[in-house]
Amino acid sequence: MIKKLQKIGNSRGILLEKPLLKLLKIDEDDSIELIPHEGGLLIRKADVRSAYQQISRKHRKSLDKLAE
């Protein structure tokens, strides 16, 4: 499948049609992961645990202060 980048504000995006999302079992409220992969980009449904781990690593100091 070939898609064209579309202008969205100052950025560019790719629209994914409902049948494709259904095939991938991705609902409209789900988060996705974008992973650089061998000259391309892997798109997959985000695992809640891995999303938490990424946020936790990136914002560790802020989360620790909130916990006090």
Image (spheres, rainbow, N blue to C red):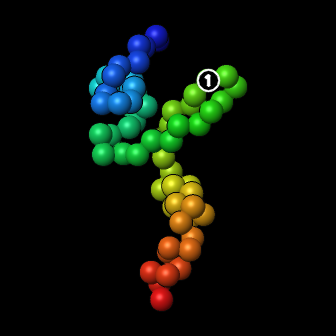
Residue at left 70%, top 25%?
38
Quarter where residue 58 is shown: bottom right
Q: Nearer the viewer, residue 25 or 4?
A: 4
Visible residue check, residue 30: yes
Q: Nearer the viewer, residue 3 or 68?
A: 68
Q: Provide residue 35's location: percent of width, then percent of height.
A: 59, 37
Tell how many labels.
Answer: 1
Q: Is residue 61 left or right of residue 27?
A: right
Q: Provide residue 48's location: percent of width, then percent of height.
A: 48, 56
Q: Is residue 54 left or right of residue 18?
A: right
Residue at left 66%, top 30%?
37
Residue with the most extreme right position: 38
Q: Is residue 28 depicted above or below 18 in this figure?
A: below
Residue at left 31%, top 28%?
8
Residue at left 67%, top 22%?
39
Identity, as a three-letter code, of the amino acid under mark 1: Gly
Q: Is residue 22 depicted above or below 59 in this figure?
A: above
Residue with the most extreme top position: 2
Q: Nearer the viewer, residue 49 or 63?
A: 63
Q: Is residue 38 depicted above or below 60 in this figure?
A: above
Visible residue check, residue 19: no
Q: Provide residue 36's location: percent of width, then percent of height.
A: 62, 33
Quarter where residue 23 is shown: top left
The residue to which callout 1 is attached is 40
Q: Provide residue 16's location: percent of width, then percent of height.
A: 36, 25
Residue with the most extreme bottom position: 68
Where disc 1 sits, the SS reads strand
Dot 1 alpha-carbon crowd within 10 angstroms: few under 14, some 14 to 19, many 20 or more: few
